[in-house]
């Protein structure tokens, strides 16, 4: 059995195979936890594999430190050429980068065979590889300088702590760690220029550390000169990162829309949620018809944007398509229709209206008048409730609802809802989105047939 500087080739091959398997399994688990549930977009895949580096990187550093310790003990102080010194750490980099590529390949299988939005960011994948190379070089140098049993786990923990701390900073320093930042918003997009600059920084500092180590152990001036060039490349990457203009809050995208029974538009990577969103917002649209908040279109907005109420448009946030996503979006939208009331009594009346808009059981409220109001409101027909909201929407919006809006309170008999001045006007009651329209659905949805 041939030996490689005192370490058998068979042992190196077995260690490399085990490392690839561990990194692949760990990378898939870590990436799966970062994936935005239900989203079919290449950007989601790239963000996930980059997010997995927080766990796979420290493991790569620990493996590199372990091999460096074995290598140094095997050499026993013998001199090496520059190329011979670099062969082992470069082989480790190839192994860990190969595991990263395998992780990307596994996650991309579904993406390749299904219709996906966006595009694969090659610069983002390059940055991920450069990041893993840096982890490996840090582990190698640490293992060589401190050949102790505890060095590999300590190197992994130190890398995890350092890069997690950098990624959590809200300054320019967060760009020094490989990643996209969390939580990730699909509307933000992935900046290819930023990834390129980060790759330059990560590859430059990794090359500087590795060549500097090689110059130290081989005492070759050429290795030192190359290390200085790598430092310049890393510095150029950092300078470009610092001078980059701040990206826009959102990028223009072509929405994916469903036009029946109301128009619902979301990011194309979230088109799978259109039917459920349509079902959740159709009843809300019917109940708000004729009020200042009436809408016929629902549109997803970036997570950073404040939900604004414009004529005919309902804006929503949709971070993912996990279980109950449509109900969460509807809850947030309905809650934004009226501000939180500082007065306890007005807040209780507000909750009654919001519960009805969401299709939930009416709350009793903390006060007797709230319980009476809920009972009075539940006694109205659906048509009467909609007429009531059209008459008193401004009071609801301004937190001015009182017992007089709900039959006068427990001491007074329930009064019927008085018709509004435009009671003769008819408003749409949207059909069930789960029922497919007939061939003449256009005539059935005409204003003459609304009831």
Image: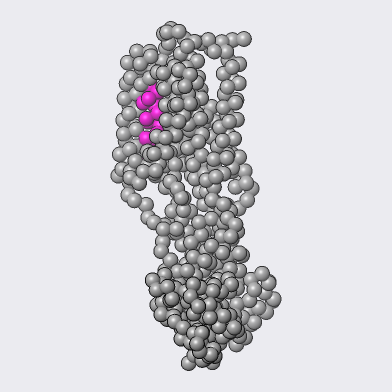
Quick one: quadrant of the N terminus?
A: top right
Q: Residue at x 44, y 34 (%)?
A: 160
Q: Residue at x 47, y 9 (%)?
A: 75
Q: Is residue 332 above or below residue 192?
A: below
* Residue 113 point in image, percent of width and height: 64, 48
The region drawn magenta spans 196-211
**Residue 256 place in picture, x, y as percent:** 55, 62
**In magenta segment, residue 239:** no
Nearer to me, 112 or 70: 70
Q: Quadrant of the C terminus?
A: bottom right
Residue 134, horizontal then vertical, whole percent: 43, 30
Q: Name the quadrant containing residue 107.
A: top right
Magenta segment: does it hold 198? yes
Kindly report the secondary structure that dominates the magenta region of the rendered protein. Answer: helix
Q: Is residue 165 above or below residue 64?
A: below
Which of 156/321 is in front? 156
Residue at 40% from the left image edge and 28% from the top image edge: 206
Q: Nearer the viewer, residue 388 or 52?
A: 388
Instruction: Report the residue at 60% width, 25% height from top.
Output: 17
x, y (%) of residue 257?
A: 55, 65
Question: Residue 77, located in which quarter of the rendered image?
Answer: top left
* Residue 84 in view in this figure: no
């Amino acid at each position: 059995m041939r030996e490689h500087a005192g370490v058998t080739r068979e042992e190196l091959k077995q260690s490399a195979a085990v490392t690839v398997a561990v990194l692949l399994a760990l990378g898939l688990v870590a990436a799966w936890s970062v994936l935005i549930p239900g989203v079919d977009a290449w950007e989601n895949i790239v963000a996930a594999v980059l997010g997995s580096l927080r766990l796979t990187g420290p493991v790569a550093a620990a493996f590199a430190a372990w091999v460096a310790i074995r290598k140094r003990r095997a050499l026993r102080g013998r001199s090496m050429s520059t190329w011979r010194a670099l062969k082992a750490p470069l082989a480790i980099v190839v192994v860990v980068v190969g595991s990263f590529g395998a992780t990307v390949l596994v996650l991309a299988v579904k993406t390749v065979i299904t219709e996906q939005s966006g595009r694969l960011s090659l610069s983002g994948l390059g940055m991920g590889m450069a990041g893993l190379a840096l982890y490996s070089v840090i582990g190698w140098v640490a293992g060589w300088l401190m050949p102790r049993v505890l060095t590999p786990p300590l190197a992994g923990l130190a890398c995890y702590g350092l890069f997690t701390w950098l990624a959590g900073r809200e300054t320019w320093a967060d760009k020094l760690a490989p990643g996209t930042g969390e939580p990730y918003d699909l509307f933000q997009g992935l900046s290819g220029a930023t990834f390129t600059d980060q790759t330059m920084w990560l590859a430059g500092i990794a090359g500087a550390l590795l060549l500097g180590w090689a110059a130290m152990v081989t005492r070759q001036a050429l290795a030192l000169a190359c290390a200085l060039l790598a430092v310049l490349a890393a510095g150029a990457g950092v300078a470009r990162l610092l001078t980059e203009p701040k990206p826009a809050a959102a990028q223009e995208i072509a929405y994916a829309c469903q036009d029946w029974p109301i128009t619902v538009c979301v990011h194309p990577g979230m088109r799978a949620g259109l039917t459920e969103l349509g079902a959740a917002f159709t009843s809300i649209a019917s109940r708000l018809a004729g009020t200042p908040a009436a809408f016929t279109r629902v549109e997803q907005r970036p997570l950073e944007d404040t939900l604004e109420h414009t004529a005919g448009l309902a804006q929503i946030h949709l971070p993912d398509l996990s279980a109950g996503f449509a109900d969460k979006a509807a809850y947030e939208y309905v809650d934004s229709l009226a501000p939180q009331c500082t007065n306890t009594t007005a807040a209780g009346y507000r909750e009654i209206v919001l519960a009805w808009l969401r299709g939930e059981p009416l709350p009793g409220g903390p006060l007797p008048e709230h319980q009476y109001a809920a009972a009075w409101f539940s006694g109205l027909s659906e048509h009467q409730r909609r007429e009531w909201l059209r008459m008193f929407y401004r009071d609801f919006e301004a937190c001015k609802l009182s017992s007089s809006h709900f039959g006068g309170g427990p001491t007074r008999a329930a009064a019927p809802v008085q018709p509004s001045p435009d009671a003769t006007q008819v408003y749409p009651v949207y059909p069930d989105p789960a029922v497919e329209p007939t061939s003449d659905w256009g005539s059935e949805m005409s204003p003459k047939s609304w009831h």
